[in-house]
Image (cartoon, rainbow, N blue to C red):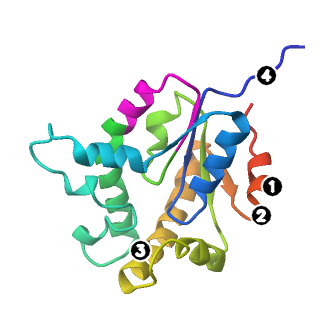
Amino acid sequence: MPTLRPPQRIFIYGVPGSGKTTIGQALAARLDYLFVEADCVRDHAQGRSSHARRDPFLALGTTEAWRPFGELSQSTAVRGLMAVRDALAPFVAEEIEKQRVPFVLEAAFLQPSDVRHVGPVLLIVTEDELAHENRFFEHRVRDQSNIDALRAARILQVYLMQEARQAGIGILSNCGTVEEVTLSIDIN
């Protein structure tokens, strides 16, 4: 019986504070794959001098991008996410193209429809609001701007879950140890 090999490219997305980076790193280590954190894609996009007109959505995070559209609501949060996705899509495609080794790529701004043909996509969520809040503020100052960003993340997570269900993308609830969560990922 042939041994199944995991896909060479795996994509993980979710809102900030969902645990996608931690899970992505653990999965990459388990598979002995390169881990690509999408922040490097954003940094690359911002540093490119070939952009004559700076797109403000290259610099805004997915939980801040609603601000140019008005007060925080489901509509403005989703509009901001889409604007960030659109701005960064060519840079994500460029990053995928340049990788020559198996990898796990994580991004809050990943557009699943842009990468599904390349490898499996998995949405990481933290449904427990308190657990999400604790993870979110692990590396952030608890100020009004970040409290608003957490509110945006909670709104966007609901949207992403609906998007994933409609597209048939796997949703993994981050509730347990990193080892338990990564071992539960079906990568074959």
Quadrant where the C terminus sits is: top right
Q: x, y percentage for residue 62? A: 39, 61
Residue tagged 4: 4
Q: Secondary structure at mark 2?
A: loop
* Element type at mark 1: helix
Q: Are marks 3 and 1 in contact (CB under 8 Å)?
A: no
Q: Disc 3 versus disc 2: distance between alpha carbons? A: 24 Å
Residue 173's image quarter? bottom right
Left or right: where 70 falls relative to 187: left
Which of discs 1 and 4 lies nearer the camera? The answer is 1
Q: Secondary structure at mark 3?
A: helix
Q: How busy is the neighbourhood of tag 2: few (under 14 within 10 Å), some, or many (20 plus)? A: few
- Amino acid type shown at disc 3: Ala
For the residue pair 23 and 165, the one nearer the viewer reads as 23
Q: What residue is pinned by disc 1?
A: 180
Query: Height in image: 73 above or below 188?
Result: below
Instruction: Identify the mark at residue 149; answer none if there is no mark.
Output: 3
Contact, mark 2 vs mark 1 (Cβ under 8 Å) = yes
Q: Residues within 10 Å of mark 1 (few under 14, many from 20)?
A: few
Q: Position of residue 116 (x, y in %)?
A: 53, 34
Residue 173 shows in the view = yes
Which sits earlier in the primary sequence, circle 4 or circle 3? 4
Q: CA distance from mark 3 to mark 1?
A: 28 Å
Residue highlighted by disc 2: 176
Q: CA distance from mark 2 to mark 4?
A: 27 Å
* Residue 165 appears in the rendering: no
Q: Nearer the viewer, residue 107 or 39?
A: 39
Q: Is residue 88 above or below residue 136?
A: above
Magenta residue check for 96:
yes
If you read the primary sequence from the N terminus, does the residue marked by circle 3 or circle 2 appear first? 3
Q: Earlier in the sequence, mark 1 or mark 4?
A: 4
Three-letter amino acid code at the position of disc 4: Leu
